[in-house]
Image (spheres, rainbow, N blue to C red):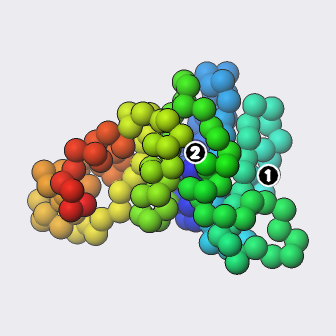
Amino acid sequence: FVGGGIGMAPLRGIITYCLDNQSRFAGITLLNAARTVADIVYKQETKEWGAIPGVQVVRAVDPGGETPDWDGEVGLAPHVLERMKPSPENTVVITCGPPIMIKFTLEALDRLGFAKDQILTTLENKMKCGLGKCGRCNIGKQYVCRDGPVFTAAQLAMLPKEY
């Protein structure tokens, strides 16, 4: 899991599901990244999750967002992810966060050898009706409200280049 800022909130449910069904997974890795130490969400929960055998939790803040007592990583989420060097073998990555973080995280995952169908991510577009009728959130023929907001990186690659 790669969560950026409040992007951790939508990931929390699936993280807890995976923790509750941990026997179905070889391991669980979570990168919880934020701009500053104050912006890290689920501080206590991630500490508890990281204490579970088979679960790796890495907390990171952007350069300049650290405090003197910060004991996590310092770096942008994609850079920290690359330093973590997760193996693409039998792995699925789920990411949620600011669009700029997702953009560069997808590029980092590509450099790490992940196939586009191994990556699930969210899209943020302004939505109005939520039914695919108003066209406010469309990207080509895809409507974020109706067809998403979760897409594989393979699906994103099929979107028009202007996206």
Q: Residue at x 54, y 31 (%)?
A: 88
Q: At 75% across and 31% down in the image, what residue appears?
A: 54
Q: Which residue is mark 1?
A: 47
Q: Secondary structure at mark 1?
A: helix
Image coordinates for residue 82, horizontal then vertical, percent: 61, 48
Q: Amino acid at mark 2?
A: Phe
**Mark 1 residue crowding within 10 angstroms, few (<14) / some (14–19) / many (20+):** some
Q: Nearer the viewer, residue 123 or 67?
A: 67
2 or 1: tag closer to the N-terminus: 2
Please indicate whether residue 154 sits to the left or right of residue 90 in the image: left
Q: Residue at x 54, y 40 (%)?
A: 112
**Is residue 90 positioned above or below 148 on the image?**
above
Q: Give the secondary structure at mark 2.
A: loop
Q: From this view, report whether residue 71 is shown above or below residue 28.
A: below
Note whether 2 is above or below 74 in the view shown: above
Q: Disc 1 residue type?
A: Lys
* Front-lying residue, 78 or 134: 78
Q: In the image, residue 136 lies at what x, y percent?
A: 18, 67
Q: Is residue 128 left or right of residue 11?
A: left
- Give the label on residue 1, or none: 2
Residue nearest the observer in this picture, 102 or 143: 102
How far across and how far down the image is residue 159, in percent?
21, 50
Q: Which mark is residue 101?
A: none
The quadrant the N terminus occupies is: top right
Residue 131 visible? The answer is no
